[in-house]
Image: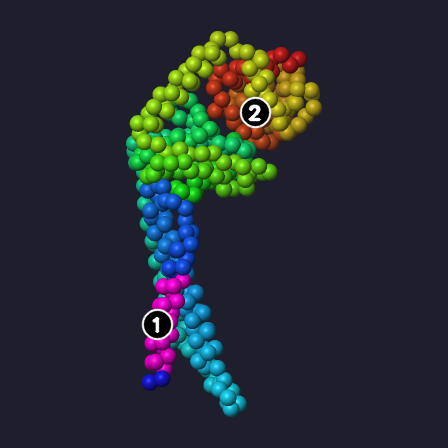
């Protein structure tokens, strides 16, 4: 039984090669530290893929190399090899088996996704706003931060928004990743398991400074987190107190250079958006749908800043301007006060 001996040898070599391949691949550290509950099922799924890959690679290369060595032409052999006309049994086998494997991976993957998305009703909710090219995190207490602080062992539900183009929220140590789409709120759940500082990266090319769109996420104990929140709330309240009272055109001008300058000129030139020169108090302003705004007043400006698609100025497209509804009301009124000065 020479054939049986070949099959036994090849099987043993394939298993050995699979093991060496898998051991080699896992020893080079393909993954960074796992720092979230969600990393568990993902790493496990990744692991069985690496095993499958090691096996398939070995299956092909071992048979190929074995044949090259063992079945090579012997000295004195001059004839052709045996002529083989297909093998129906083998073809059915290698169609059915991969089909079953692919379906099994599909089922495992779906179940895995269910685990990764498991929702905790008590999750901490944080709003994440990505824009070219930074991150901002808004906490339920009202303040916002450019660093994402999270308490360890507590699920956080991130509500992701983009104020301009596509971005993608990604922390390699947490494994999960989610696209951020202008005009839509996407969600991501993370339960950090390890205290430490990790990088939040943008994983969707979003312009010239895409590579530098990085912010830290700091995972701390619940006690340290509570202390941080108390401190931030105090700072936020002090800031609110300072900005109370009358809207201020000078503060509005600062906000303008920060948020609006790129698209809205003050000189009458039409850019990506309408100019602000002589905007306030204008009558019968034409809109894209053919109607007119009788008077450009505070109410119209407020709506245009916080819900730009409600009334689109003639000559411009819907969704061209992101919503600035994340600005505080007092900031919107400061902006309006500034627009009023531009005659
Ligand atoms: Cu934001 Cu890339």
Magenta span: predominant SS is: helix
Q: Which mark is residue 75?
A: none
Q: Quadrant of residue 33?
A: top left
Residue 25 percent across, percent down from the top left: 41, 57
C-alpha gap between disc 2 and disc 1: 66 Å
Residue identifier under label 2: 259
Nearer the N terminus, badge 2 or badge 1? 1
Chain part drawn in magenta: 3-21
* Total number of numbered discs in the rendering: 2
Q: Which element is circle 1 on?
A: helix
Residue identifier under label 1: 12
Horizontal side of 293 relative to 225 (left or right) equals right
Q: Which element is circle 2 on?
A: helix
110 and 66: which is toward the camera: 66
Residue drawn at the location 40% of the way across and 62% of the way down: 21
**Residue 10 magenta:** yes
Residue drawn at the location 54% of the way across and 40% of the way down: 211
Residue drawn at the location 43% of the way across and 65% of the way down: 57
10 and 24: which is toward the camera: 24
Mark 2 or 1: in front is 1
Other-residue count near label 2 (Cα within 10 Å), few / some / many at <14 / 14–19 / ≥20: few
Q: Up-down: is 258 above or below 179?
A: above
**Residue 102 magenta:** no
The outermost residue toward the top is: 245
331 and 57: which is toward the camera: 57
Residue 280 percent across, percent down from the top left: 61, 14
Residue 125 percent across, percent down from the top left: 37, 30
Quadrant of the frame with the N terminus: bottom left
33 and 312: which is toward the camera: 33
Residue drawn at the location 57% of the way across and 23% of the way down: 258
């Amino acid at each position: 039984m020479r054939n049986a001996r070949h099959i036994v040898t090849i099987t043993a070599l394939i298993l050995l090669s699979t093991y060496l391949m898998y051991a080699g691949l896992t020893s080079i550290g393909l993954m960074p530290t796992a720092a979230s509950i969600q990393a568990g099922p993902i790493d496990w799924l990744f692991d069985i893929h690496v095993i499958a890959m090691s096996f398939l690679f070995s299956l092909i290369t071992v048979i190929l190399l074995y044949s090259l060595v063992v079945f090579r032409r012997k000295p004195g052999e001059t004839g052709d090899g045996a002529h083989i006309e297909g093998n129906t049994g083998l073809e059915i086998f290698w169609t059915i088996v991969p089909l079953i494997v692919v379906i099994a991976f599909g089922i495992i993957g779906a179940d895995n996704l269910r685990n990764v998305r498991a929702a905790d009703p008590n999750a901490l909710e944080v709003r994440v706003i990505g824009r070219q090219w930074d991150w901002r995190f808004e906490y339920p207490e009202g303040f916002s931060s450019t660093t994402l602080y999270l308490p360890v062992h507590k699920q956080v539900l991130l509500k992701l928004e983009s104020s301009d183009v596509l971005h993608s929220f990604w922390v390699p140590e947490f494994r999960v990743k989610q696209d951020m789409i202008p005009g839509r709120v996407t969600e991501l759940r993370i339960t950090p398991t390890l205290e430490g500082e990790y990088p939040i990266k943008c994983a969707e090319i979003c312009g010239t400074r895409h590579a530098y769109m990085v912010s830290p996420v700091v995972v701390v104990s619940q006690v340290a987190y509570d202390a941080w929140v108390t401190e931030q709330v105090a700072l936020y309240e002090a800031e609110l107190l300072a900005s109370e009272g009358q809207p201020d055109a000078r503060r509005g001008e600062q906000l303008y250079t920060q948020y609006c300058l790129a698209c809205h000129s003050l000189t009458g030139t039409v850019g990506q958006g309408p100019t602000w020169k002589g905007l306030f108090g204008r009558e019968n302003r034409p809109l894209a749908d053919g109607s007119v705004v009788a008077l450009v007043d505070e109410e119209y400006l407020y709506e245009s800043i916080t819900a730009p698609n409600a009334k689109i100025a003639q000559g411009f497209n819907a969704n061209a301007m992101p919503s600035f509804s994340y600005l505080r009301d007092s900031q919107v009124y400061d902006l309006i006060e500034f627009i009023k000065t531009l005659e």
